[in-house]
Image (tube, rainbow, N blue to C red):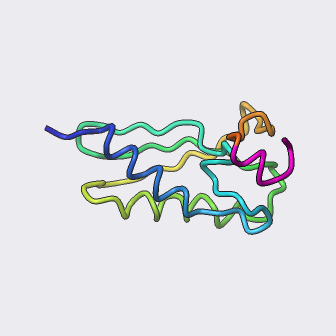
């Protein structure tokens, strides 16, 4: 039996190595990842956003998220859906990210 929860945790660990070059915090802690779905064949759907539609890494960050998620053993295909609704705001950040960026 496949443990999707374990696969999701492994994906999250990989996503914590993806950083917006302008912000010293990873995409997971920033709250840019809205959703991770894993089907029974280990295909992965990741719904994410960026801090703004004008973000200069809009072309490079989603492919990096896809590439990192595909590194998890057993994962077959990864689809990254870049969305703008709901818009990102700093309330989506973890406490650690807020502390790192001086919001606490």
Residue 19 vs 104, above or below: the answer is: below
The magenta stretch is 96-104
**Residue 64 falls in image quadrant:** bottom right
Magenta segment: does it hold 61? Answer: no
Q: Position of residue 49 (x, y in %)?
A: 68, 45
Q: List x then y, in percent, for residue 78.
A: 41, 52
The image shows residue 88, relative to residue 13, as above or below, that is above
- Quarter holding residue 41: top left
State whether residue 98 is above or below residue 21: above
Left/right placement of residue 3 relative to residue 97 reads: left
Query: How far from the left and from the top, in percent, is residue 56?
Result: 79, 64
Residue closest to the eye, 81 or 70: 70
Identity of the residue drawn at 41% across and 37% down: 37
98 in the magenta segment: yes
Locate the C terminus and report the quarter of the image it occupies. top right
| Relative horizontal placement of residue 88, taking residue 64 as reference (left or right) | right
Q: Residue at x 31, y 43 (%)?
A: 6
């Amino acid at each position: 039996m496949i443990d999707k929860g374990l696969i999701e945790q492994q994906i999250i660990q990989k996503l914590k190595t993806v950083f917006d070059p302008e912000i010293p915090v990873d995409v997971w802690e920033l709250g840019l990842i809205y959703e991770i779905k894993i089907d029974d064949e280990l295909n992965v759907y990741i719904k994410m956003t960026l801090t703004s539609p004008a973000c200069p890494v809009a072309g490079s960050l989603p492919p990096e998220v896809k590439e990192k998620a595909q590194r998890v053993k057993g994962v077959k295909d990864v689809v990254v859906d870049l969305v703008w609704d709901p818009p990102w705001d700093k309330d989506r950040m973890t406490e650690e990210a807020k502390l790192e960026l001086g919001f606490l």
